[in-house]
C-alpha cells in the first residue's frame, strides 16, 4: 500500500486541476454523500478507476463571500482571536479570513450538514445550535448586528476601527452572551462558531486556504499529513525532525513553494 | 406506487458491522440475502486512501463520513418537562452512514464486558443490597445472557479483526501483562499488542507504582499483518493518528471493509443496495409476522422487499425508531413504566484528566485509535463499592489516538480559549501534554428513553426519534470518583500540572463524548422486561431480529463494539442451528 510521494503528488494535483471549473462545483463533486444514485452490487467488491474521493481544496485568491466591510470586520476579529507575534502567525497572517470566505461560500456556509427545519424555539444551552440561519446567513446577520451594537455603544464606530482593548471587550461580551444582539442573532452561539471556524482555518491543511505555509503546524510542532510513524513509536522523548507536509507536499519537493 | 421485488430469505436493514457479520453468516448457510444501506458505497481506495485520509477538517469537522443530519436527525431533551428540539448539528455522538457505517470511522477499541456486567442487577443486589440497584430510580436489569455464553463469539470477533492485545485471563489462569480483571478467554489475542508511545508508557509506569494493573488496550488497529478466517488481509498500523472519525487508508484498522466485505461481496447469493432507506417493517394483519420492508431509494422510487426474515442491523437509534414506526412491540411510557420499546436508553459517562509536562516531548501525533495503556482496577465491580453510593465504574486509559490540532490542543487550567495567551499556551503545550480518558458506565434510569417526536419530521414525513436523557446522580458520583482515581495516576507521573475535566451538569449535545448510545430495544429473559430475547429476536414478531447496542439493558464501562459483535454472532449461531430448521420463537415466553 505504500505509494511513492510522486504518485501522491500527481494524484492530488490532478484532483485540483479537475476542480478549477469553480469552487462550488468542486465542493459538490467531492462532498456529496447525499443524493448519489442508487446502486445494486452482487458478485464483487465494486471498484472503478478514477473515482477517488479527493479532498475539496479551494482555488483563487479573491474573496467571494464577504463584502469589503465584512472582510474588514472578519480580519479585525480573527486578529484578536489569534494575534500575530514572533511565536507564530496570527490568524490573518495564516490566511484565516480567506479560509472563512471559501467555507461560507461553499457547502458549510449553506448548512449542508445542519438540520434547519422548524419550528425554531431557542431551547436550552444543552440542546445546542437552535437557529434557522445556516452558517453563511448567521455570519452575515451577526456581523451587521455586532457593528450596530458597536455603533450604539462606541460613538458610531465599527468593530474594525475600535482599539484592541475595546475589541477584546466586545468579543468577551459575545463569548459570555452578555452582549445581546438584534436581528435574531444569538451572540454566544455565533461566537462559538466563529472561534471554532477560526481554529479550523488556522490548523487545517493549506488546501483549504488557511494555515499559510503550514506555519501554524510549525508553531506547535505538528508534522501534518504524514501517515507512517512506525520508526518513531518507541523513540520516547525524541523530537521528530520532519518539517510539516500537506496534501500537496511541501516546499522543497518541487524546488519551491 | 410501490414496486414489489422478488422475495428473499433475509433482508438486512443497514450495512455496518452487524449487517456485514450477519450477512456473511446467513450467506454461508446458502440463504439469499439483500442488504439495504441508506448511505453510499465506501471503500478504502476510493474513499479514504492514504493520500488524503489524514484530513481533520473534512472528516472530523465537516462530517464527511458521518450521517448528514440535514435530512434526518433526532430531537433531544434532558427531561420530560422540556420540549425536545432537533439535534441540528452533530456533536455529542457522530452517527455513521454508508457501507461500513460507524465501523469505518471508529477507533478500533475492542473490549469484552465483565462477567458481572451481564448481571448488573442480581450481582450488585447480592453484594450491596437492593437499594444499590433501585436508588436514583435506576432501572438496571440482567441481560439474560452470560459472559460464558458469549465468550466463543467474542473470540470469533477477535479472530475476524485480528485484535492486537495481551490476554490477562486465559481459561482462568491470570497472565502477566494483561488485564487481570477480565473474564476468562478461550484463546490469546490473534496478534500481539501495539507498541506504546511515550505518554501511555509513562502512564503505565505511574499506575504500576500505585499498585494498579496496567495493560495494553486491546485494539483493532493491528500491530502486525494478519489474515483472518475469511481470507481478508490486514496490514500493520503505521500510527498515523487518524483513526477515530476517519477511515483507515492503510488496511490496518478492522472494519467491515477490511474484514468481511472482500469475502461477502463475492457471494452470488448476496446483494447490496446502497442509497436505499427503509421506511418501515411491514407486518401481517395480526402483527405477529413481518412480511418484508418498504424502502425508498435516492431517486425517490419506493419498493417493497418481501423477506422471510427481517434483520434490523442499523444503528441503535434507527433500529428503535423503525420498531416504533412499524408498530412492533409496545412503546415505553415513563409515567406508567409500561411498554418496552424505547425503554432504558443509556449512554457513556466520559471525563478526562489532562497532563502537562515541561521536560518531556510526547509527540502526540504518533497515535492510533486504541493506542493506550489502561487500568481496569475501577471498572464494573472490580472494586468494593461499599459506602460509595453508586454502582458501575470506568476504565482509565493513558491514551493517544492522535494529535489532530483543531481538536486536540490541551491548555492548562485557566487559559482563555482565544487571544495571545491561548496561542502561547498552544505552542508551549502541544508536544508536551496528553489526556487520560475515563470511560465510564451509564446505568439505565426510569426517565431516560426513546420515543417518536410529536412535532419534527424527516424528509420522508416520518416522525423523528425523540431522545430524553440526562445523567443521574449514580453517574455523577461514579464519574467524580473515577476522575479522582485518574488524577492520582496523573499526579504520580510528576508533571508540571494537571487539569481535571469532570463530567459536570446535564448531558449536553454539543461537545463530542462518544458514539456509544445503547438501549431502547433491550434484551432480557421475558417479554415483560425486554424487546428481544437473548438471541436478539423480537418477542412479539419472531421473524424480526434487532441487532446492536439497542439490546444493552444498561451500558458498561467499555466501548460497545466487541459486545455488539459477540451478540450478533451469538444470534447468528442460534438462527443457523435452530431457527432455520423450525422458524419461530427461539425462547418460549
Image (cartoon, grey):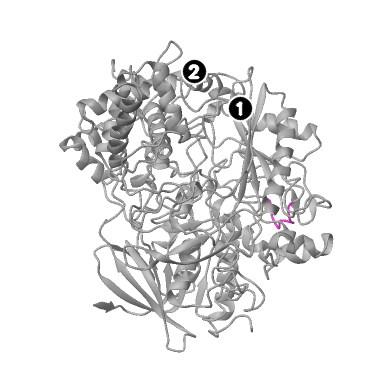
Return the residue found at the far left: A21
Front-lying residue, B327 or B3: B327
Question: Is B185 covered by the magenta stretch?
Answer: yes
Q: Chain of mark 2?
A: A
Quarter of the image for the N terminus of chain A: give it.
top left
Going by the picture, which residue comes out furthest to the top?
A86
Mark 1, secondary structure of its residue? loop
Judging by the rendered image, the residue that carries numbered circle 1 is B413
Q: Which residue is mark 2?
A: A241
- In the rendered structure, the answer to whether residue B13 lies left or right of residue B139 reads left
* Neighbour tally class for label 1: few under 14, some 14-19, many 20 plus, Cα within 10 Å: few
Chain name for mark 1: B
One can see residue B260 in this view: no
Specify start and end residues of the magenta stretch as a single range: B182-188
Name above or below for residue B257 compared with residue A252: below
Looking at this view, is A37 or A107 the one in front? A107
Q: Residue at x 49, y 85 (%)?
A: B288
Left or right: where A34 falls relative to B204? left
Amino acid at each position: 500500500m505504500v505509494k511513492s510521494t510522486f504518485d501522491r503528488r500527481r494524484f492530488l494535483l490532478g484532483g485540483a486541476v479537475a476542480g478549477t471549473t469553480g469552487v462550488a462545483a468542486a465542493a459538490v463533486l467531492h462532498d456529496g454523500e447525499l443524493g448519489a444514485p442508487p446502486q445494486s452490487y452482487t458478485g464483487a467488491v465494486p471498484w472503478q478507476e478514477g473515482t477517488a474521493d479527493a479532498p475539496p481544496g479551494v482555488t483563487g485568491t479573491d474573496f467571494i463571500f464577504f463584502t469589503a466591510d465584512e472582510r474588514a470586520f472578519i480580519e479585525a476579529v480573527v486578529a484578536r482571536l489569534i494575534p500575530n507575534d514572533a511565536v507564530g502567525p496570527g490568524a490573518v497572517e495564516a490566511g484565516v479570513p480567506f479560509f472563512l470566505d471559501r467555507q461560507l461560500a461553499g457547502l458549510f456556509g449553506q448548512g449542508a450538514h445542519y438540520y434547519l427545519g422548524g419550528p425554531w424555539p431557542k431551547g436550552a444551552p444543552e440542546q445546542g445550535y437552535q437557529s434557522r440561519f445556516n452558517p453563511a446567513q448567521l455570519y452575515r446577520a451577526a456581523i451587521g448586528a455586532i457593528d450596530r451594537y458597536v455603533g450604539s455603544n462606541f460613538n458610531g464606530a465599527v468593530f474594525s476601527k475600535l482599539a484592541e482593548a475595546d475589541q477584546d471587550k466586545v468579543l468577551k461580551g459575545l463569548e459570555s452572551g452578555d452582549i445581546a444582539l438584534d436581528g435574531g442573532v444569538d451572540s454566544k452561539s455565533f461566537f462559538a462558531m466563529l472561534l471554532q471556524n477560526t481554529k479550523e482555518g488556522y490548523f487545517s491543511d493549506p488546501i483549504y486556504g488557511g494555515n499559510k505555509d503550514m506555519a501554524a503546524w510549525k508553531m506547535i510542532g505538528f508534522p501534518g499529513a504524514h501517515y507512517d510513524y512506525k520508526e518513531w513509536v518507541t523513540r520516547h522523548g525524541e523530537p521528530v525532525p520532519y518539517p510539516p507536509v500537506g496534501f500537496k507536499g511541501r516546499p522543497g519537493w518541487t524546488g519551491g513553494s | 406506487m410501490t414496486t414489489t421485488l422478488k422475495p428473499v430469505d433475509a433482508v438486512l436493514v443497514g450495512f455496518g458491522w452487524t449487517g456485514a457479520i450477519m450477512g456473511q453468516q446467513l450467506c454461508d448457510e446458502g440463504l439469499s440475502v439483500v442488504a439495504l444501506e441508506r448511505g453510499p458505497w465506501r471503500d478504502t481506495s476510493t474513499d479514504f486512501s492514504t493520500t488524503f485520509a489524514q484530513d481533520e477538517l473534512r472528516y472530523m469537522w465537516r462530517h464527511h463520513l458521518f450521517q448528514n443530519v440535514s435530512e434526518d436527525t433526532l430531537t433531544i431533551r434532558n427531561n420530560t418537562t422540556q420540549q425536545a428540539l432537533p439535534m441540528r448539528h452533530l456533536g455529542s455522538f457522530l452517527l455513521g452512514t454508508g457501507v461500513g457505517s460507524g465501523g469505518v470511522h471508529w477507533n478500533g477499541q475492542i473490549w469484552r464486558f465483565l462477567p458481572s456486567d451481564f448481571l448488573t442487577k442480581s450481582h450488585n443486589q447480592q453484594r450491596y443490597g437492593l437499594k444499590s440497584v433501585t436508588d436514583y430510580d435506576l432501572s438496571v436489569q440482567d441481560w439474560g445472557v452470560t459472559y460464558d455464553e458469549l465468550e466463543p463469539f467474542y473470540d470469533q470477533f477477535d479472530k475476524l479483526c485480528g485484535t492486537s492485545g495481551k490476554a490477562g485471563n486465559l481459561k482462568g489462569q491470570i497472565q502477566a501483562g494483561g488485564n487481570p480483571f477480565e473474564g476468562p478467554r478461550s484463546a490469546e489475542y490473534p496478534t500481539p499488542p501495539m507498541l506504546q508511545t511515550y505518554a501511555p508508557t509513562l502512564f503505565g509506569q505511574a499506575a504500576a507504582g500505585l499498585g494498579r494493573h496496567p495493560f495494553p488496550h486491546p485494539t483493532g488497529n493491528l500491530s502486525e499483518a494478519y489474515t483472518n478466517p475469511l481470507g481478508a488481509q490486514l496490514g500493520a498500523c503505521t500510527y498515523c493518528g487518524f483513526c477515530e472519525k476517519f477511515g483507515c487508508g492503510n488496511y490496518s484498522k478492522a472494519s467491515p471493509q477490511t474484514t468481511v466485505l472482500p469475502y461477502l461481496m463475492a457471494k452470488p447469493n448476496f446483494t447490496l443496495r446502497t442509497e436505499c432507506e427503509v421506511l418501515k417493517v411491514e407486518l401481517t394483519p395480526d402483527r405477529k409476522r413481518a412480511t418484508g420492508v418498504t424502502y425508498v431509494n435516492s431517486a425517490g422510487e419506493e419498493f417493497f422487499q418481501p423477506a422471510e426474515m427481517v434483520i434490523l442491523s442499523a444503528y441503535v437509534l434507527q433500529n428503535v425508531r423503525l420498531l416504533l414506526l412499524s408498530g412492533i412491540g409496545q412503546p415505553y411510557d415513563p409515567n406508567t413504566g409500561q411498554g418496552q420499546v424505547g425503554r432504558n436508553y443509556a449512554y457513556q459517562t466520559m471525563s478526562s484528566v489532562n497532563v502537562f509536562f515541561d521536560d518531556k516531548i510526547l509527540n502526540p501525533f504518533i497515535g492510533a485509535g486504541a493506542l493506550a495503556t489502561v487500568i481496569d482496577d475501577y471498572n464494573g465491580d472490580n472494586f468494593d463499592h461499599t459506602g460509595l453510593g453508586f454502582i458501575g465504574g470506568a476504565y482509565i486509559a493513558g491514551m493517544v489516538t492522535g494529535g489532530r490540532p483543531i481538536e486536540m490542543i490541551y491548555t492548562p487550567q485557566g487559559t482563555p480559549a482565544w487571544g495571545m495567551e491561548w496561542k502561547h499556551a498552544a505552542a508551549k503545550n502541544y508536544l508536551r501534554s496528553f489526556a487520560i480518558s475515563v470511560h465510564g458506565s451509564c446505568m439505565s434510569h426510569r426517565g431516560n428513553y426513546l420515543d417518536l417526536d410529536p412535532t419534527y419530521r424527516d424528509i420522508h414525513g416520518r416522525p423523528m426519534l425523540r431522545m430524553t436523557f440526562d445523567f443521574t446522580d449514580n453517574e455523577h458520583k461514579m464519574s467524580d470518583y473515577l476522575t479522582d482515581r485518574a488524577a492520582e495516576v496523573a499526579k504520580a507521573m510528576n508533571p508540571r500540572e494537571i487539569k481535571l475535566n469532570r463530567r459536570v451538569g446535564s448531558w449536553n449535545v454539543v461537545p463530542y463524548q462518544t458514539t456509544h448510545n445503547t438501549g431502547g430495544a433491550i434484551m432480557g429473559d421475558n417479554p415483560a422486561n425486554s424487546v428481544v430475547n437473548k438471541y436478539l429476536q423480537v418477542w412479539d414478531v419472531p421473524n424480526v431480529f434487532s441487532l446492536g447496542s439497542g439490546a444493552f439493558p444498561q451500558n458498561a464501562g467499555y466501548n460497545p463494539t466487541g459486545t455488539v459483535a459477540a451478540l450478533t454472532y451469538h444470534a447468528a449461531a442460534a438462527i443457523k442451528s435452530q431457527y432455520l430448521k423450525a422458524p419461530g420463537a427461539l425462547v418460549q415466553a
